[in-house]
């Protein structure tokens, strides 16, 4: 039977966050940010295993309480997010996971994802020929820029903000990334972009505005407030 697995790239430094340590380990509402991410995914009943891809130089002391037994940490992260995902997929295949299984790649810094939205993605895409991703229809007016000034107003119809998880067949995603590994994964900004290079069209599943990626210093306060309001 086809299974579902989570893969969380967690090898980045988060330089834009302005934190003294990698941003995924910054504490929010009493826990390292990445633990909120892990615990949310662990509540998704359809997920079999979870794989957290760490930097080989990672020396973080992981807390034992709250760590789900079916999640594991592998120190095979690369110099870019795409390389970390690719290395993680290789580790999953080497461990015996079937290439036809689904893998849901999710950013460690999207700590506000809900189990319900992940389940909705799985239900929407499990019988799809390609797979898909959570995304949000663009809500604001979009401008293009030249020399610091507005060059044009871009129509926002049919434009979406990509989120994660992004869900594809394990072997297909691995092979799509393998095709661009020699270039250093140039042009690969997310998993869907790798799949699109194959001429495939991932399904868009509407997500939530709260599922944003904690990136800048101001994002931490907002994420903390949302986590505490949920508690």
Image: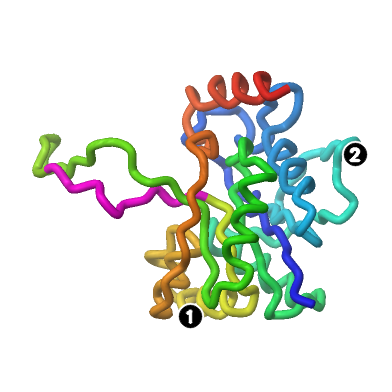
* Residue appearing at x 81%, y 78% in the figure: 96
Task: Give the position of the N terminus as an image quadrant.
Answer: bottom right
Closer to the N terminus: mark 1 or mark 2?
A: 2
Q: Is residue 169 magenta?
A: no
Segment tinted magenta in the rendering:
153-163
Q: Which residue is mark 2?
A: 64
Is any atom of residue 80 visible in this view?
A: no
* Residue appearing at x 58%, y 69% in the figure: 168
Q: Is residue 210 above or below residue 8?
A: above
Task: Give the numbered dot on residue 66.
Answer: none
Name the residue nearer the viewer: 79 or 33.
Answer: 33
- Residue 44, position as x, y percentages in the image: 75, 50
Name the residue nearer the viewer: 179 or 190.
Answer: 190
- Residue 118, position as x, y percentages in the image: 64, 51
* Residue appearing at x 50%, y 74% in the figure: 181
Q: Is residue 161 magenta?
A: yes
Secondary structure beneath label 1: helix
Q: Which residue is mark 1?
A: 179
């Amino acid at each position: 039977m086809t299974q579902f697995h989570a893969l969380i790239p967690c090898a980045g430094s988060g330089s834009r966050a302005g934190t003294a340590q990698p941003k995924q380990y910054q504490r929010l509402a009493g826990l390292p940010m990445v633990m909120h991410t892990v615990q949310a995914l662990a509540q998704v009943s359809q997920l079999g295993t979870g794989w957290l891809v760490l930097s080989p130089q990672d020396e973080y002391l992981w807390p034992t309480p709250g760590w789900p037994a079916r999640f594991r940490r592998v120190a095979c992260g690369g110099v870019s997010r795409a390389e970390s995902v690719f290395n993680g997929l290789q580790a999953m295949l080497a461990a015996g996971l079937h290439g036809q299984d689904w893998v849901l790649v999710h950013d460690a810094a999207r700590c506000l994802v809900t189990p319900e939205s992940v389940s909705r993605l799985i239900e929407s895409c499990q019988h799809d020929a390609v797979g898909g991703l959570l995304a949000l229809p663009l809500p604001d007016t979009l401008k293009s820029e030249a020399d610091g000034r507005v060059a044009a107003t871009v129509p926002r119809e049919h434009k979406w903000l990509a989120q994660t998880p992004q869900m594809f067949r394990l072997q297909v995603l691995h092979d799509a990334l393998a095709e661009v590994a020699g270039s250093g994964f140039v042009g690969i900004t997310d998993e869907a972009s790798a799949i699109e290079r194959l001429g495939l069209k991932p399904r868009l599943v509407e997500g939530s505005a709260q599922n944003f990626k904690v990136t800048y210093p101001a994002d931490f306060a907002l994420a903390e407030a949302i986590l505490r309001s949920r508690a």
